[in-house]
Image: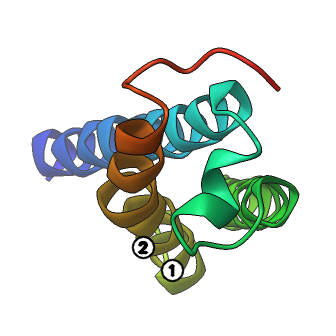
Amino acid sequence: MAVLDHLYFWTDQVLFWGLVALRAWAVIDCITRRAAAFPAVDKLTKPAWLAILVFSGLFGSLSALGSQVGPISLISVIVASVYLADVRPAVREISGGKGKGW
């Protein structure tokens, strides 16, 4: 049983830190994008996306800190995934693929 407990523990750890990295990637990418590109592609403004990503990232990471990854953590991953899959490509296309500027 100890081997199985170790396996569960390390699986949870890898999953937790992987999801933290995904959330951090979304926040860092949002920070580096030009603010004018967001409304140009009919998305929420940069400050709005940044607030959503930071709030959901912190809340999701803190909710899963003591135990296994829970539903709140997974919801925050969905928020980051929506940004990375929908908003990021549109903003990146408008800004020529470069993330410079505030």
In-image side of 46 versus 13 (left or right) = right
Q: Mark 1: few, some, or many residues within 10 Å (few <14, many ≥20)?
A: some
What's the residue at 69%, 34% (across, down)?
34
Q: Residue at x 47, y 60 (%)?
A: 83
Residue 7, placed above or below residue 71? above
Q: Which mark is residue 78?
A: 2
Residue 76 at what x, y percent from top left? 56, 70
Query: Do residues under tags 1 and 2 come within 8 Å of each other at their CB atoms?
Result: yes
Residue furthest to the bottom: 71
Residue drawn at x 37%, y 24% is 97
Q: What element does badge 2 sit on? A: helix
* Mark 2 residue crowding within 10 angstroms, few (<14) / some (14–19) / many (20+): some
Horizontal and vertical percent position of residue 14: 31, 35
The amino acid type of the residue labelled 2 equals Ile
Query: Relative to 95, does residue 20 appear above or below in the rendering?
Result: below
Judge from the rendering whether residue 79 lies leftward or rightward of residue 33; answer left or right. left
What mark, if any, has residue 75 been given in the picture?
A: 1
The residue drawn where x is 20% and y is 43% is 2
* Residue 64 seen in render: no
What's the image's color scheme?
rainbow
In-front residue for pair 78/18: 78
Q: Is residue 98 left or right of residue 102?
A: left
Give residue 35's position: percent from left, percent from top.
77, 43
